[in-house]
Amino acid sequence: ERGGYEHFMLKEIHEQPQAVRDTLSGRINRSGDGVLLDGVHLDPEWVRGLRSVYLVACGTAYHAGLIGGRLIERLAGIPVWNEVASEFRSRDPLIDERTLFVAISQSGETADTLSALREARRRGARILAVTNVVGSSVAREADDVVYTWAGPEIAVASTKAYTTQVVALALLALRLAEITGHTGEQERRDLLEALRFLSEALEQALELEEDVRAIGERTRTWRDAFFIGRGLDYFSALEGQLKLKEISYIHAEAYPAGELKHGTLALIEPGTPVIALMTQPDQREKMISNIEEVRARGADVLLIARQDLAGVDRHAQTTLMLPAVHPLLMPVVAAVPLQLLAYYAAVTRGADVDKPRNLAKSVTVE
Ligand code: F6R
């Protein structure tokens, strides 16, 4: 049932090109300039009058929401709030009929996400679900649904659900952008074109597996790790550190790369592993100086960079090069080495990859 793979997690990591293909299937129109979302019925007038979009979820799905939120803000020009579901109600959120509330949940049964959804409903928001399970509670309680077609995800650590959530949210962002007109047709076309090549890029990213396995073996001596990035790369850093902690039990923290020097830089000592993400061309120079900052303190830097950011590899001890896709889609590609790193760290350290301690696949208590 694991299809020749040693763990479900590894199988599911490898299923991502297909999962992304399935999630895109039938959702880009023939002329390549529009998005078709069957289960979504947004009134254009209402969309143009939207006050905000809230994206609410837990854990990995929350990280997908951070990326999706940035895409919605950037492409559709609507103000976005992201919130962890368990915190949502504690803020007395400014939500009303002019709010689109997006709940993101692989299982569609996460209690925190469901209660946030119900609270948003009470306040009059329209509810859109991004979920992987047809007929799940979140899907049933929503007005609109965008399914991720990732197929069953069995490993506790989420992988293909995450990448397909980002893809689903990119489609939603493009759909909203068509309506608001905030982004011109050519830019939307470019992104749709890039989405078509995403599966291929994921196949290429999976070819990094042997290199990542070797790095995984080095994690035997790791005690703490730092993940840094700017912009969308910070969100990838958050997901990378969660994955590593969750299954390998190595303590890790993610920081916006520019924020380390405001406090935590003191924790970087000779040999401290720092995983630096650099997939955004416009962040290149600033990222290089942040890497130099940690190098100056002796950090052991693993750089995960888009391959066309020429010359960046000389700034790190180890570099993994990612295939170049549209900058807004780089988080999908960057997820692959981060997942593999967590996986091989867990294997190296003898942890139970598919069933990490103290975790359930679907958390149905608040
Ligand atoms: C991490 C992980 C969890 C889930 C979170 C939400 O690998 O799997 O953080 O992402 O519990 O679960 P869903 O998406 O089912 O609501």
Image (cartoon, helix red, strand yellow):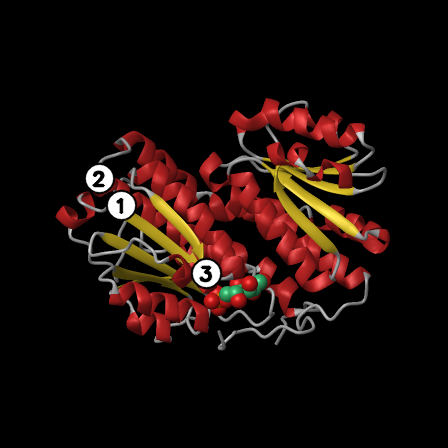
Residue 88, compared with residue 330, is above or below; it is: below
137 up-or-down from 328: above or below:
below
Query: What amino acid is found at the position of numbered circle 1 in the picture?
Result: Leu
Left or right of 305 in this view: 151: left
**Residue bearing the label numbered 1:** 176
Q: Which residue is mark 3?
A: 87
Q: Secondary structure at mark 3?
A: helix
Q: Is residue 16 left or right of residue 270?
A: left
Identify the secondary structure beneath mark 1.
helix
Callout 3 amino acid: Glu
The picture places residue 356, in percent across and down from the top left corner, at 68, 70
Amino acid carrying mark 2 in the image? Thr
Query: Quick check: can you spot residue 312?
Result: yes
Q: Is mark 2 within 8 Å of ligand 1?
A: no
Labelled pair 1, 3 in contact (Cβ < 8 Å): no
Quarter of the figure that contains the N terminus: bottom right
Measure the C-alpha gap from mark 1 to mark 2: 6 Å
